[in-house]
Amino acid sequence: ADADEDKVERVRTLRERPTADNVAGDDAASHYFPGEEVLKPRNMKIVQMVYGDSWPELAALMRRAPGVTLRVLLKRLQRKDVEWRKTRRDMNHIWSTVYHNNYHKSLDHRSFQFKQADKQALSPVALVQEAQQLRKKALQAKNQP
């Protein structure tokens, strides 16, 4: 949840900085434009997550008109944030159910080995071999005085 909020906040702060779109005339030269900061890897990762395979087109738009593009990106990111939160909330219920159901199984981490050993010990071949060994021992005990 905090990571999603950070993404929205990062785009919001970039959007609120003056850009060539919202500063005109001589003031434009004295203002900071987010151009290169917008294209930092952490910001591009956000764009990649939201836009998928079409993110290079958006990166090009961010270079050309960051003010307009950031406005659109912020709206889309806020919608995605709501969607991700809802998905996380829904999945948390599913995950907690799975964790609850698997907790006791995790305590018995050697059960697989025990089941394998039982399966091998109770197989027909193993039972026949055990019967033959018992018979041999009984015959040997009978032959010895």
Image (cartoon, grey):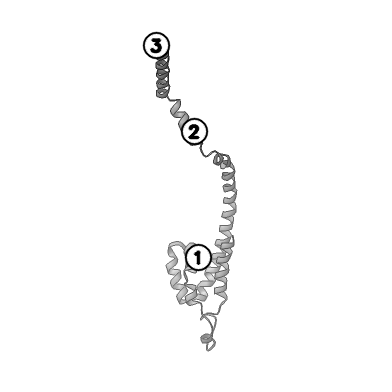
Going by the numbered disc 3, the residue's amino acid type is Asn
Q: Which residue is mark 3?
A: 143
Circles 2 and 3 in contact, beta carbons < 8 Å? no
Q: CA distance from mark 2 to mark 1?
A: 48 Å
Q: Is residue 8 above or below residue 116?
A: below
Q: Is residue 118 above or below residue 54?
A: above
Q: Which residue is mark 1?
A: 46
Closer to the observer: label 2 or label 3? 3
Q: Residue furthest front?
A: 145
Closer to the observer: label 3 or label 1? 3
Q: Tag 3 or tag 2, which sits nearer the N-term?
A: 2
Q: Tag 1 or tag 2, which sits nearer the N-term?
A: 1
Image coordinates of residue 34 in percent, x first then y, are 51, 77
Q: Which residue is mark 2?
A: 114
Image coordinates of residue 80 in percent, x first then y, are 55, 61
* Quarter in which the N terminus is drawn: bottom right
Q: Secondary structure at mark 2?
A: helix
Q: Secondary structure at mark 3?
A: helix
Q: Is residue 23 above or below residue 38?
A: below
Closer to the observer: label 2 or label 1? 2
Q: Secondary structure at mark 1?
A: helix
Q: Nearer the viewer, residue 46 or 72?
A: 46
Going by the numbered disc 2, the residue's amino acid type is Phe
